[in-house]
Image (tube, helix red, strand yellow):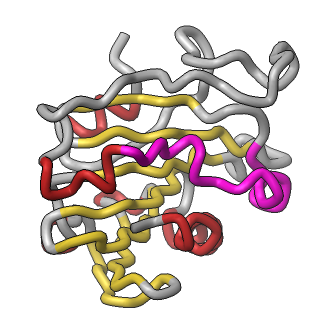
Amino acid sequence: MLSPFLGALLLGSVACSSGTDGRAFPSEDTATATTRTPAFELDETTVPSSRGSLASIDPCELVPESGKGELGLTGFGEAEKAPSSWGCSWQVKGSTIASSYTIAVIVYPKVGLDDVVGQDKQETTVGSHKAVRSLRSGGGGCSYAMEVAEKSRVEVLAVGGDGGQLCGPALQLAMAIEPQVP
């Protein structure tokens, strides 16, 4: 079965998985260690040499442990790799299904802010980074894409329910990881 993350990439945006069957890492309930092994290895064919600083970024490790609880993230994120990006997603469980959503951190080593897919794009800043906030087609998600270079970015995407209401959590996570984004 194609994960939502990879399926959405094929459709031109990014979504995330719920972390059920095929989970790359143990859940917090079964984990005995506080660290994890990366789910994929990057090589020179994955990341252009001019963007070597992105090669060392593991999106699952960008979120500070101290901020996970505040953001509603539990356990390890689920790592996924696609042809043009790699990312990490978490399921945030609300009091109802309608208030639950998935949030992801995605690294795009060859795709810049001009290539952000979505509606209602607004230029902004996240910390010291030039950024673009956008709503995903169909209104089911909100993202904050932070520029690393003209043709590379790190993006936070929240999907599920009303995308406009997900801009708050997406911005909160973007601000939490921004100090570690090159």
Instruction: From the viewer's side, name the closer residue of 140 and 104.
Output: 104
* Displayed quadrant of residue 26: top right
The residue under the point 34% across, 57% down is 138
Q: Main secondary structure of the magenta part?
A: helix
The residue under the point 45% across, 87% down is 128
**Relative horizontal placement of residue 61, taking residue 148 as reference (left or right):** right
Location of the N terminus by quadrant is: top left
Magenta stretch: give its range: 56-73
Instruction: From the viewer's side, name the closer residue of 115 and 182.
Output: 182
The count of marks equals 0
Instruction: From the viewer's side, name the closer residue of 152 and 51.
Output: 51
Location of the C terminus by quadrant is: bottom left
* Displayed quadrant of residue 83: top left
The residue under the point 53% across, 10% down is 22
Task: Name above or below for residue 85 compared with residue 180.
Answer: above
Magenta stretch contains residue 60 = yes
The residue under the point 32% across, 52% down is 54
Instruction: From the viewer's side, name the closer residue of 119 and 22.
Output: 22
Residue 65 location, x and y as percent?
Answer: 77, 51
Task: Name above or below for residue 17 compared with residue 92.
Answer: above
**Relative horizontal placement of residue 20, taking residue 144 as reference (left or right):** right
Residue 76 location, x and y as percent?
Answer: 68, 32
Magenta stretch contains residue 172 = no
Residue 169 location, x and y as percent?
Answer: 64, 66
Residue 5 location, x and y as percent?
Answer: 38, 34
